[in-house]
Amino acid sequence: MAEMMKAIQLWEFGGPEVLHYTEVPRPIVKADEVLVHVRAASLNPPDLYLRDGYRTLPPEWRPDANFPLILGTDVSGVVVDKGHHVSGVNMGDEIYSMVRFPQNLMKGSGTYAEYVCVPASELALKPKSINHVQAAGAPMSLLTAWQFLIEPEHDAPNPFQSFPHRAVPLEGRTVLVNGAAGGVGHLMVQIAKWKGARVIAVASGKHEAFLRELGANEFIDYTKVAAETVVREVDLTIDAVGGSNMERFLRIIKPGGAMFLVNPLGFSGQDEAAKRNITVTSTQVRSNGKQLAEAGRLLGNGTLRVMIDSTWPMAKAAAAHERAAQGGIQGKVLLING
């Protein structure tokens, strides 16, 4: 008889109320995987989109669901079993990972659970100086920022554009981050600052002290003034928000500058960007244990910090999703076991 565990299952698409805390079979580790006892798992936008059935996507892009699903990609926990092909990872090791992304984009990677199987190539040892909650808050947001700003580290086809994304020099440059207080945005601010950029953070006023503490040189409260009306001569604009009218930021970027779009769906300024000689680019974040280990050194020595908006017991995943959907998040929303 299969060993059982608790998990959050999705049996249909809908609002937070469709998330069910229930008992399911514990996964069995494969040859190239480790079995992780989940201590914490973070919420990311793809979790909310998948729960909702990706209704914002064109119909032909929406997933064909194979219910039930277990959501979640980001995890921090303890290795309790491993496959016979796995080396360099030991029982009892504390690890963190973004699991099988984007290949499991449409079905979830199962981290909203007591246990999850993780490919050994996608994990890194958790920095000893941070706890499981901070570590679980990092992977998707940290890898997104890293692969935009430092190195993509993959040559997979880009679903958003016909050309590969390339990072740009940051030292001595002016970088504006829109959505600077969010999970990805607050790490973009820190990495750009670490690389020697002058950083302008755009968020609501309640986040000003927090973002200045993270190193922002200037702060713009978008509830009081539109950033594109008060800023000029920016080398790079990073939009970590998405939605309509992203092209408004083109007018503040220097000729030869760049605009990075974390969520490029809806951007319609390609012609204007070409006229202004501005490169507009995006990329799809991908699981990468090597990069997590590299970036983890910066988490470990305090150069980068993961800010936590709130934590919720795993059984309260629906409430956590409600919090994430409210907006105004400062950092990450986390689920915890035990």
Image (cartoon, rainbow, N blue to C red):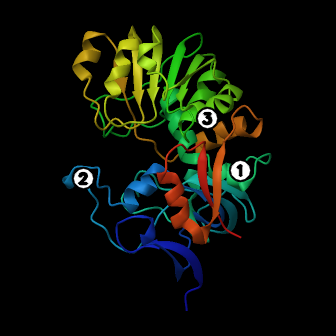
Up-down: is 237 above or below 31?
A: above
Taking the image as shown, residue 257 lies to the left or right of residue 75, namely left
User: Hey, which residue is sitting farthest left in the picture?
Assistant: 60
Viewer-side label of 2, 1? 2
Residue 61: image tag: 2
Q: Which residue is mark 1?
A: 126
Q: Nearer the viewer, residue 68 or 81?
A: 68
Up-down: is 135 above or below 116?
A: above
Tell me what residue is drawn at x 62 percent, y 49 percent.
137
Q: Earlier in the sequence, mark 2 or mark 3?
A: 2
* Mark 2 residue type: Trp
Q: Is residue 196 visible?
A: yes
Up-down: is 237 above or below 204?
A: above
Tell me what residue is drawn at x 32 percent, y 60 percent.
53
Image quadrant in which you'd find residue 165? top left
Viewer-side label of 1, 3? 3
* Mark 3 residue type: Lys
User: Hey, which residue is sitting farthest right in the picture?
Assistant: 129
Q: CA distance from mark 2 to mark 1?
A: 35 Å
Give the percent coordinates (x, y) of residue 231: 47, 12
Q: Which residue is mark 3?
A: 206
Q: Is residue 125 visible?
A: no
Secondary structure beneath dot 1 equals: loop
Q: CA distance from mark 1 to mark 3?
A: 31 Å
* Mark 1 residue type: Lys
